[in-house]
Amino acid sequence: MGKLRMLQQEKRLLEEEIGNIQSVSDNLQKELVILLTSVNEIEGLHKDKEGACRKLQWQCEESEQDFDRQLNQNKMSEELLEQYRCEIQEVKLKHRKLRMRFENQLLQLIEQHKQLDFVFNPKRLPDELKKAENIKHQLLSAEQVKLAQLHKLDEELEELKKQKQLETTAAQIHE
């Protein structure tokens, strides 16, 4: 928020500078019109007065130099204005990216909240307990079946050991 306020304040300052530059530009335009009018008057007086012509030419050259300086200054102001516009666009783009990233994070958090609410909802607890009990009974039944199979295999193994022992004993007696 602090950055936003700072950027808004900078924006206001830039807008004031733009207004000042526009005012200077308008004044320059008015002066240009005045200067052009003066030039026309000077050309008319040139035919009548030769001595005044030199003086007026000198004034005209001065005016043109001022005009050139002002044009250069205006050009620099326009370039600066364009630079500020580009910077403003960059800032807007950065803010847009930040806002989109924030919105995505917010949507993810909302989705996580929904999932957690679904998982840890007290209304679902009795159903989850029933499911757990059913799974427990199924696992116990499976364990009993496996234990019975294991017991049967142990008995068969014992029976085979006894048979093998009897065969070994019978073979030793025959020898």
Image (tube, grey):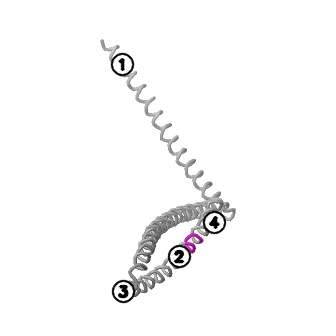
Dividing the image into 4 quarters, which one contains the N terminus? Answer: bottom right
Dividing the image into 4 quarters, which one contains the C terminus? Answer: top left
The residue identified by callout 4 is 9
Mark sitting earlier along the chain (2/3)? 2
**The residue positioned farthest toward the top in the image shown:** 175
Q: Secondary structure at mark 2?
A: helix
The residue identified by callout 2 is 22
Mark sitting earlier along the chain (1/3)? 3
- Whether residue 90 sits left or right of residue 135 in the image: it is left
Question: Which amino acid lies under the numbered mark 2 shown in the image of this protein?
Answer: Gln
Residue at position x 43%, y 31% in the image: 157
The one of 175 and 93 positioned closer to us in this rendering = 93
Disc 4 crowd, CA 10 A, few/some/many (<14, 14-19, 20+): few
Mark sitting earlier along the chain (4/3)? 4
Question: Which amino acid lies under the numbered mark 4 shown in the image of this protein?
Answer: Gln
Question: Which amino acid lies under the numbered mark 3 shown in the image of this protein?
Answer: Lys
Q: Which residues are magenta?
A: 16-20
Q: Which mark is residue 168?
A: 1
The one of 107 and 64 positioned closer to us in this rendering = 64
- Whether residue 160 sits left or right of residue 97 in the image: it is left
Query: Marks 4 and 2, how far apart in space?
Result: 20 Å
Q: Quadrant of residue 95?
A: bottom right
Disc 1 crowd, CA 10 A, few/some/many (<14, 14-19, 20+): few
Q: Secondary structure at mark 1?
A: helix
Question: Which amino acid lies under the numbered mark 1 shown in the image of this protein?
Answer: Thr
Mark sitting earlier along the chain (4/2)? 4
